[in-house]
Image (tube, rainbow, N blue to C red):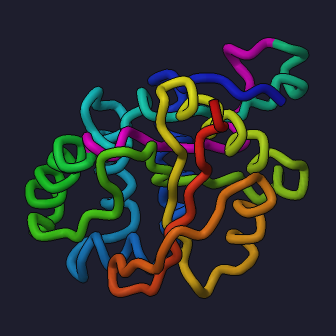
Amino acid sequence: MIITTATTAHAADIAQLIMMAMTDDCCQFLAGKDHTLDDFYQMMVKLVLMDDSQYSWRNAFVALDDEATNGDIDHAPVAGVIVGYDGKDLRRLRRRFQEEALCCLGMDYSNMDDETQEGEFYLDSLAVYSEYRKRGIASKLLQRFVDYAAELGLPAALLVDKNNPNAERLYTSLGFVYKNDAMWGGHEMRHLVHELPKQ
């Protein structure tokens, strides 16, 4: 398994995995009652292919199963993805989601809460396909994300639902620490941060 920067060739998988991280219920809520999960998926693929969206392939690392193709990473299946960005860019990047949701779904998300801010590298989405779980892939993706954030001089940060203790255990096992409570999308969340190493 290798962790590498994503390319446009991974767009379909990135969109599918982001939706998996969001959950079907959340995606259906965002799509609205007049649209299907497939409609939402088609919109997400467009967003992944953009250069300046929060879900852009440029903001993603993928785990590739190079063993399935004898080391040929150009044709290796995607096992998982992690997507994130500099918190200061949230509103600029989210504008694309808001434009596409209005255009494709007729949904107005111009008043969404901010889930991150300047001074942190925000983990937006992390997901691994079910057939690849329990192999440490999420941990490897998270470690690459934390290392990349540190290269940029930023602490990695995320929001985890208070009702998802398994996810929180994974994050804390890799060095994330509780910072404060937060609310996002009507859910009670915990804001976790992976501080930069002391100089």
Image position of 159 with respect to 183: above or below: above
Please name the residue shown 48% across and 60% down the image: 19
Whether residue 61 appears in this view of the structure is: yes
Q: What x and y, as percent, mark residue 168?
A: 69, 71
- The magenta segment is 72-89
Image position of 195 with respect to 153: above or below: below
Q: Nearer the viewer, residue 195 or 104?
A: 195
Q: Quadrant of residue 3?
A: top right
Please name the residue shown 23% across and 42% down the image: 93
Q: Is residue 28 left or right of residue 169?
A: left
Please name the residue shown 29% across and 27% down the image: 51
Q: Quadrant of the C terminus?
A: top right
Q: What x and y, as percent, mark residue 140?
A: 77, 40
Whether residue 107 appears in this view of the structure is: no
Q: Is residue 78 left or right of residue 37?
A: right
Q: How many marks?
A: 0
Q: Nearer the viewer, residue 71 or 150?
A: 150
Q: What x and y, as percent, mark residue 179?
A: 52, 68
Q: What x and y, as percent, mark residue 116?
A: 34, 57
Q: Is residue 72 left or right of residue 148?
A: right
Q: Quadrant of residue 50?
A: top left
Image position of 31 with respect to 139: above or below: below
Assess whether residue 63 is covered by the magenta stretch: no
Please name the residue shown 15% across and 67% down the image: 109
Image position of 43 with respect to 149: above or below: below
Q: Nearer the viewer, residue 78 or 189?
A: 189
Q: Quadrant of the N terminus?
A: top right
